[in-house]
């Protein structure tokens, strides 16, 4: 019950922040996409379609930013994402630096590079939370959704290693609800409970251009046409409605489903009628201070940057007139990514 109350409070905080859209107090998290590179080929993402020749921020540059951010009235939560963040050889060093600054650190990973040694190193460095992707307990189905053949086995090994030596890290599962795995979602909830993991968070299937490389030419967002023919978009609406209702019930009964209840309900609206879905307010630009691999600050990954941490102070970027103007553009945006987990 306590966990359900905490999750329900997400809805209240979200409502307040959207109401104060043009005067956000502080971001709820600092998200740094420390690399644009990825070693997987997920159909839900386009980052892997292109490798940039530009240099990503160095270890010292990221440390400088984290040190500055820790002194500001920002969230104490920093999320290391990507691309695949473990492709950075300095990820343990950066987590340790965040820990010394008393920042709560999270890594979002595909799990491919999380061997027993790396997991222990991250534990010793002070990592607080690790989120790994698992879309089904059927190995072939999961692997197809990740674009590589050994993803499922690697994830199972990560969970096995974690259970052997849990340490202080909380381990969570991230899963995408799509047409092919809709019957495999509830077993994932049971799996999380059985293995005593921290929880599971669900994501609606999105246009692959939502996760795009930040340099060079990349596929632009498509407003509506992408879901009209995409086979991964859920079409069995009765089955979807029953699933969402079941997830909400399991959540009320104490299952560690980490989505806000309103976010789960919004998935019904999204899949049933993506045009009507545009009426759901977008919280991008007020929930996260997002920095890409090159230091550009993006209130939303679908818009141009509002500044760069190598040239400006983070707080000045967050409160700038350019940021205020962009939040107004975001409020009028019709893209489909507004219920994604990192901004909802």
Image (cartoon, rainbow, N blue to C red):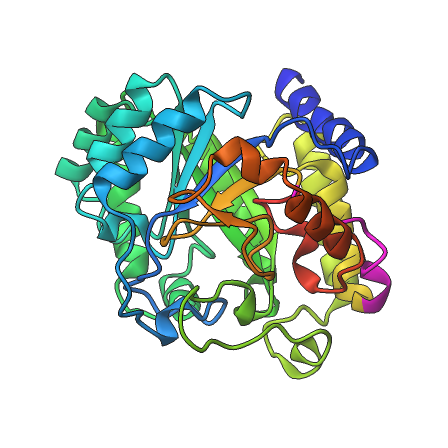
Q: Residue at x 56, y 44 (%)?
A: 342
Q: Can residue 128 be seen in this snapshot?
A: no
Q: Nearer the viewer, residue 313 or 111?
A: 313
Locate the C terminus and report the quarter of the image it occupies: top right
280 inside magenta stretch: yes
Q: Residue at x 71, y 64 (%)?
A: 335
Judge left or right: residue 246 versus residue 313. right
Judge left or right: residue 49 versus residue 60. right
Residue 134 rendering spot, x and y as whole percentages = 43, 52
Q: Can residue 53 be seen in this snapshot?
A: yes
Q: Nearer the viewer, residue 267 or 45?
A: 45
Q: Quadrant of residue 173?
A: top left
The stretch of residues the image draws in magenta is 275-285
Residue 324 rendering spot, x and y as whole percentages = 71, 44
Residue 260 rendering spot, x and y as whole percentages = 69, 36
Count of numbered circles on the image: 0
Most extreme residue toward the bottom is 229
17 inside magenta stretch: no
Q: Residue at x 80, y 48 (%)?
A: 281
On screen, 73 above or below 24?
Answer: above
Q: Residue at x 63, y 25 (%)?
A: 254
Locate the N terminus and report the quarter of the image it occupies: top right
Residue 199 rendering spot, x and y as whole percentages = 50, 34
Judge left or right: residue 259 versus residue 77. right
On screen, 297 above or below 123?
Answer: below
Magenta segment, prevailing SS (helix, strand or loop): loop
């Amino acid at each position: 019950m306590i966990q359900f109350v905490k999750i329900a409070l997400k809805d209240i905080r979200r409502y307040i922040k959207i109401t104060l859209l043009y005067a956000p107090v502080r971001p709820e998290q600092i998200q740094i996409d420390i690399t644009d590179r990825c070693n997987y080929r997920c159909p839900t993402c386009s980052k892997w379609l292109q490798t940039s020749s530009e240099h990503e921020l160095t270890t010292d540059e990221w440390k400088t930013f984290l040190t500055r951010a820790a002194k500001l009235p920002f969230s104490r939560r920093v999320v290391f994402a990507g691309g695949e963040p473990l492709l950075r050889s300095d990820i343990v060093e950066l987590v340790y630096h965040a820990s010394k600054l008393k920042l709560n650190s999270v890594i979002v990973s595909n799990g491919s590079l999380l061997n027993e040694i790396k997991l222990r190193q991250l534990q010793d460095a002070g990592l607080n939370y690790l989120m790994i992707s698992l879309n089904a307990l059927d190995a072939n189905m999961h692997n197809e959704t990740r674009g590589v053949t050994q993803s499922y086995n690697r994830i199972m090994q990560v969970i096995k290693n974690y259970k052997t030596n849990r340490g202080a890290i909380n381990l969570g599962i991230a899963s995408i609800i799509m047409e092919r795995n809709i019957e495999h979602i509830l077993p994932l909830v049971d799996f999380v409970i059985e293995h005593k993991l921290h929880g599971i968070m669900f994501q609606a299937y999105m246009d692959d251009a939502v996760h795009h490389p930040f340099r060079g030419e990349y596929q632009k967002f498509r407003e509506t046409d992408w879901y009209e023919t995409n086979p991964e978009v859920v079409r069995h609406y009765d089955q979807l409605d029953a699933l969402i209702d079941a997830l909400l019930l399991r959540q009320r009964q104490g299952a560690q489903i980490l989505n806000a209840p309103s976010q789960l309900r919004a998935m019904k609206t999204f899949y049933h009628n993506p045009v009507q879905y545009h009426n759901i307010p977008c919280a991008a630009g007020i929930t996260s201070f997002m920095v890409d691999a090159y230091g550009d600050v993006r209130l939303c990954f679908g818009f141009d940057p509002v500044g760069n941490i190598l040239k400006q102070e983070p707080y000045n970027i967050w409160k700038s007139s350019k940021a205020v103007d962009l939040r107004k553009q975001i409020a009028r945006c019709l893209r489909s990514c507004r219920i994604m987990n990192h901004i909802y």
